[in-house]
Image: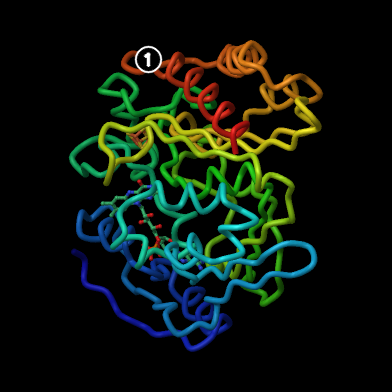
């Protein structure tokens, strides 16, 4: 591990101030990702700015929705009574991730910013455009079973690993950020994570030094009909091969509104817009679910080792739709 200075921030402005003085500094929240990256020498910050004393751990409900503090823990968020009652999709997605011990440490802001689990990214002996821009992509011709089938580029085929973020995408969340100027900006969730294009070193639209202060969720009508389905190699400590977050608003047996996102298939949470548009106004039947899933998967572009994700994606979508219907 590269030696680093340890600084403690007392408030958000101080945290941003410390970071903007050193372009090789990094924030520390729960530490469950950044410390692993440092131990593997994938990340080599010369200064760590501890966010632990910032008062950003509240979860606050309002007339328009709920605000999740960036430093609230994943466990506390998943088990919060309002999240369990009004946003069960989010609770299920968080609880499908990692392990109880990791969720106890992991923060909401850190969860969004966790980096890809592409094994070549973690292996500093291998070329990787995300870790070392311009060095190449070992996964492109390598073992790319876990990798993307949507939205990849010839520079990077990695997938984004968070479960929580897939539910946040389906629920139309937004991310509140304090900029280095001290003013706030709000990033719609769909614009927060980015596709790799020519710059896979960039996972998201945050600028250096910006601090996530909260993740905000609007009210929704999905509480009775939502599902998170995660397909993985093991039942714990495994990232999604494919996952689906689905919320339905029903009118009788018809789907009035559907919000669906997929994980394990792209460099960012993949909003299943084709399936959403197809389902709207149609009866909630297996035949309609199957057509919607086929339509969504019809534009997938698999790599040499992950063609199975097309059928898996289709079946996971159908499964999630059926579970959401049951409630
Ligand atoms: C063995 C293992 C299994 C796992 N399995 C899963 C899984 O199945 N599903 C899943 O979704 N996740 C999984 N995870 C990942 C885990 O959820 C993340 O490591 C965790 O959510 C990161 O949160 P943290 O607070 O620890 O972040 P940290 O490691 O502290 O920080 C992560 C990044 O975010 C930055 N950061 C943190 N907070 C802020 C902020 N407020 N503003 C700006 N930047 C910030 C840090 O600088 C760092 O770059 C697993 C992790 C491990 C170790
Ligand atoms: S897929 Fe992305 S993260 Fe993996 S080796 Fe290629 S550039 Fe690196």
- How would you rate the neighbour count of disc 1 (Cα within 10 Å): few for under 14, some for 14-19, many for 20 or more? few
Q: Residue at x 61, y 15 (%)?
A: 286
- Does residue 269 sit above or below 302 in this rendering? below
Q: Position of residue 291 (x, y in %)?
A: 64, 11
- Percent coordinates x, y for residue 212 in the rendering: 57, 66
x 25%, y 36%: residue? 234
The yes-or-no answer for disc 1 within 8 Å of ligand 2 is: no
Q: Residue 61: which quarter of the image?
A: bottom right
Vertical arrangement, residue 136 with respect to residue 16, above or below: above
Residue assigned mark 1: 308
Left or right for 94, reference 12: left
Ligand 2 quarter of the rendering: top left
Could you tell whether 141 is left or right of 188 in the image? left
Q: Position of residue 109 (x, y in %)?
A: 50, 63
The quadrant of the image that shows the C terminus is top right
Q: Quadrant of the N terminus?
A: bottom left
Kindly state the secondary structure of the residue where label 1 is placed.
helix
Total number of numbered discs in the rendering: 1
Rendering coords of residue 250 (x, y %): 75, 34
Image quadrant where residue 257 sits: top right
Who is closer to the viewer here, 136 or 41?
A: 41
Here the colouring is: rainbow
Q: Nearer the viewer, residue 327 or 237?
A: 327
Q: Nearer the viewer, residue 274 or 250?
A: 250
Left or right: 97 with respect to 260?
left
């Amino acid at each position: 591990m590269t030696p680093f200075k340890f600084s403690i921030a007392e408030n958000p402005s101080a945290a941003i101030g410390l970071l903007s003085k050193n372009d090789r500094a990094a924030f520390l929240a729960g530490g469950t990702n950044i410390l692993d990256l440092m131990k593997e020498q994938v990340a080599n910050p010369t200064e760590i700015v501890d966010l632990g004393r910032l008062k950003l751990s509240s979860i606050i409900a309002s007339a328009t929705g709920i605000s999740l503090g960036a430093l609230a823990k994943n466990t506390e968020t998943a088990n919060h009574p309002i999240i369990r009652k009004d946003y069960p999709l989010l609770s299920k997605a968080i609880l499908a991730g990692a392990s109880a011990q990791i969720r106890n440490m992991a923060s909401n802001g850190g969860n969004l910013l966790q980096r890809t689990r592409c094994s070549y990214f973690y292996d500093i002996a291998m070329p990787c455009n995300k870790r070392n821009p311009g060095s190449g992509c070992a996964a492109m011709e390598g073992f790319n079973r876990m990798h993307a089938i949507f939205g990849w580029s010839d520079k990077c085929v990695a997938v984004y690993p968070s479960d929580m973020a897939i539910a946040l995408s389906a629920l139309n969340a937004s991310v509140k950020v304090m900029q280095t100027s001290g003013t706030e900006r709000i990033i719609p969730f769909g614009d927060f994570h980015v596709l790799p294009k020519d710059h896979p070193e960039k996972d998201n639209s945050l600028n250096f030094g910006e601090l996530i202060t909260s993740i905000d969720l609007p009210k929704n009508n999905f509480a009775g009909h939502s599902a998170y389905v995660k397909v993985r190699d093991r039942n714990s400590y495994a990232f999604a091969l494919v996952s689906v977050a689905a919320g339905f608003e029903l009118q009788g047996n018809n789907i009035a509104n559907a919000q669906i996102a997929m994980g394990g298939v792209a460099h960012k949470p993949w909003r299943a817009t084709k399936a959403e548009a197809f389902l709207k106004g149609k009866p909630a039947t297996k035949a309609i679910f199957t057509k919607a899933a086929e339509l969504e998967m019809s534009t997938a572009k698999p790599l040499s080792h992950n063609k199975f994700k097309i059928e898996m994606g289709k079946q996971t979508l159908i499964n999630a739709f059926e579970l959401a219907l049951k409630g």
